[in-house]
Image (cartoon, rainbow, N blue to C red):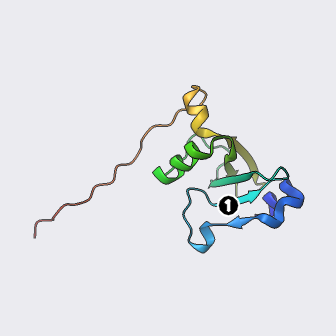
Amino acid sequence: MKQLERRIGPCAYSLRHHSIIGETPGYDISYTDHNGINKAIEVKGSDLAQMTSFELTDNELNAAKRLRDNYIVWLVLNMEKNTTYKTITDPFGLAHSEDLEISPSNWLVRGFITDS
């Protein structure tokens, strides 16, 4: 949050940390930029210096699809030492322009009865 506050400067007053208060709009944080546009940020972290993949839930992907250029994934890398930050704006749009690959990695199984 502190890094984001520094990056967005005066707009930091509008920061809302959804995930910390149990809200699940499909992103962790939102704020209103200097043009009055709502921005949504999904945070993905790793202790590694590089990240070659990360998972988005259906809810996160649907928010990315709905918000497009206003949806930003923040990759927080090397979290234990010399933390770095990378951003991906509009992952849904990038996936459809072939600059990014999005594919299903998990399937929910429910509605079953186990044997005793």
Closer to the camera in the image, 32 or 76: 32
Q: Residue at 68%, 41% (x, y): give it.
A: 69
Residue closest to the far right: 10
Q: Residue at 56%, 68% (x, y): give it.
A: 23
Residue closest to the far top: 98
Residue 55 visible? The answer is no
Q: Label 1 belongs to which residue?
A: 29
40 left or right, relative to 23: right
- The amino acid type found where label 1 is placed reads Ile
The N terminus - image quarter: bottom right
Count of numbered labels shown in the rendering: 1
Closer to the camera in the image, 68 or 95: 68
Q: Residue at 67%, 54% (x, y): give it.
A: 41
Give how far across and how far down residue 24 sits, in percent: 54, 63
Residue 27 visible? The answer is yes
Position above or below: 40 against 14: above
Dividing the picture into quadrants, the one containing residue 95 is: top right
Give how far across and how far down residue 44 sits, in percent: 62, 53
The C terminus - image quarter: bottom left
Label 1 element class: strand
> Dot 1, crowdedness within 10 Å: few (<14), some or many (≥20)?
many
Give how far across and how far down residue 3 sits, in percent: 80, 59
Q: Residue at 26%, 59% (x, y): give it.
A: 110
Position above or below: 96 against 107: above
Residue closest to the far bottom: 21
Residue closest to the far front: 36
Position above or below: 63 against 113: above
